[in-house]
Image (tube, grey):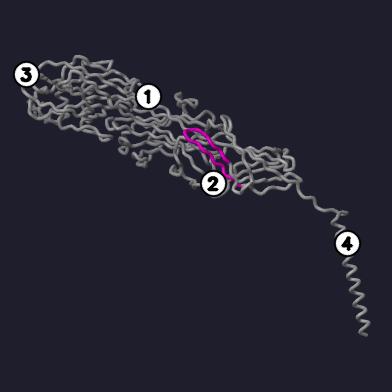
Amino acid sequence: MKKTSRTFKRFAALTSASLLAACMVAPMAMTSNAAEDVKTSITITDPQTNASKSYKAYQLLTASVDTTGEENAYTYAVNPTFRPILKEIAKVSEEETDNAKIDEAILTYIEGLSSTTGTNTGTMRTFADAVYNKILENDIQTETTTTTGSFTGIDQGYYLIAQDTVTGQVDTTSSLVMVDTAGDTALTVTVKKDYPKFDKLIGDICDDAKEIPSEWNASIYDWGTDADHDKCKLDAVPFRLVATLPSDYASYNHYTLSFHDDLQNDVFGDYTIKDVYIADASGTKLKSLTSADYNFDKECTANHSTHGDGCDFVLTIEDLKDYEEAVAGGKVIVEYTAPFTANTKLGSQGNWNTGLLEYSNNPYNSGSGEADNTTSTTPEVSVVAFTYEVVINKIKASDKSELAGAAFKLEKKVNGSYVLVKEFTLEDNLTTFTFSGLDDGTYKLTETKVPAGYNGIDPIEFTVTADHSDQELTVLNGTPLVDDAISFTAKIDEDESSLTANVENNSGSELPSTGGIGTTVFYLGGGAMVAVAGVYLISKKRMKNTQE
């Protein structure tokens, strides 16, 4: 039992999987006044409404309280049940056998503990983790339990309260609560929990604005929740899955992360994993992971997605604690691409992709895939990709009627040069040419076959621009690089996002023929020349005779 003039710090410290937040209150001086048996009640408030309310309370220290003086006076003593593990954690010499000295050392050790700030692990949290792990290791039982979150009529003391089960599935973790009840008859503490954050992002880029390298380079993209892309396989849609590790990550001996991803049914083709890596809090890569560092399941069957058809893959890192680069507040990032298919949707609803993160939720289980490893998931996060079409109608300039016998090709500017998007031939026998699956950028339309009897057009260069934000397409425009070269009409609805334009052909000028005005001109011109020549010859002959 410790009775001294030193101030003993009272804590109401809260944890998320042992996240300890020490709440300092006014100190109580320890006096020698007579002790009174004062009971107390503790109510645990858990902000995770879907989490378990099953808690166990372990009285590490007893507290005797005297209410007869001007201030409540209290005296702490180590509970003999926990003396062996507290002695070990406080690093009291194994040779020390005097319980009074052991308890003095334990109390002094606890007085010197610090709380947790942000992602910096305080010694109080480390202490709580160590105590609970030892309790589990030594199978120390307690009769003080609750399934309602409230302890009523318990003895005064210094308690470690542990959430012993985690039943919630979304955004749930276990918790520890360190509570000093001395002098209080009722306490309410709110569990401060933490869990990993999950973000799913899609990369956006204008192909003629940035150079697209042959090797994967995520930095060329603008990452957000929506983007537009084309169906060209060279321009497969890029995705990024980001897990941000919780502030209590250090509490875990093992930590499992599983990225679940769902591509919208029939919209995206075969995906390709581009990069998996551990990064710091800013996203800077610290360590690349290879396929040997994670499990990859293409046959997942989970159905968690609002927009997709279930699950396309699960990428699991069995034990992230194997990598020293992974720390609280740091990130684990997965990047991959998937091309559009012929079934890609063109409407304003876009093409969706959804993911979520599964993670270890209890640092006091193995956390490495054994039977006692429990996991929870984050809420699902979705991104959307838009794509558009350009429709060219071939018409006569004279009466605006359809004109057959033409063929067109469309090219897109990529890395400063035009590459073919699609080409129609004369055999297609079309008057309407639809180029489907385009995104923003610069394009060139070329008439490769001109209808008989008509003049061709010069190639037309134009840009496609769009506005999309908050996962909604709002504006679509087509603008020629040469004024009035072409005029587009935009249409945006649930089923279609398109730009339509008419391309007119004028009939060719007819060449002159025999019997027309052209030959008459030539005949008249020829007669005049003969007459002039005759006059010249006659005049020249007269001049000669005169000279003779």
Helix, strand or loop at mark 3: loop
Amino acid at pointer 3: Ala
Distance in Å between CA atoms under marks 2 and 1: 43 Å
For residue 404, what is the image quadrant?
Answer: top right
> Pointer 2 and pointer 1: residues touching (CB < 8 Å)?
no
Q: Main secondary structure of the magenta part?
A: strand
N-terminal-most mark, 2 or 1? 1
Distance in Å between CA atoms under marks 1 and 3: 50 Å
The range drawn in magenta is 461-477
Q: What residue is at 74 percent from the left and 40 percent from the top? A: 399
- Residue 74 visible? The answer is no
Instruction: Choose between 255 and 393: the one closer to the eye.
Output: 393
Distance in Å between CA atoms under marks 1 and 4: 99 Å
According to the image, label 3 marks what residue? 34
Residue 521, image x and y in percent? 86, 59
Q: What residue is at 41 percent from the left and 36 percent from the top? A: 334
- Residue 414: give its label: 2
Helix, strand or loop at mark 1: loop
Residue 304, image x and y in percent? 44, 24
Distance in Å between CA atoms under marks 2 and 4: 60 Å
> Pointer 3 and pointer 2: residues touching (CB < 8 Å)?
no
According to the image, label 1 marks what residue? 170
Amino acid at pointer 4: Leu
N-terminal-most mark, 1 or 4? 1
Q: Nearer the viewer, mark 4 or mark 3?
A: 4
Amino acid at pointer 2: Val
Amino acid at pointer 1: Val
Residue 332, image x and y in percent? 37, 36
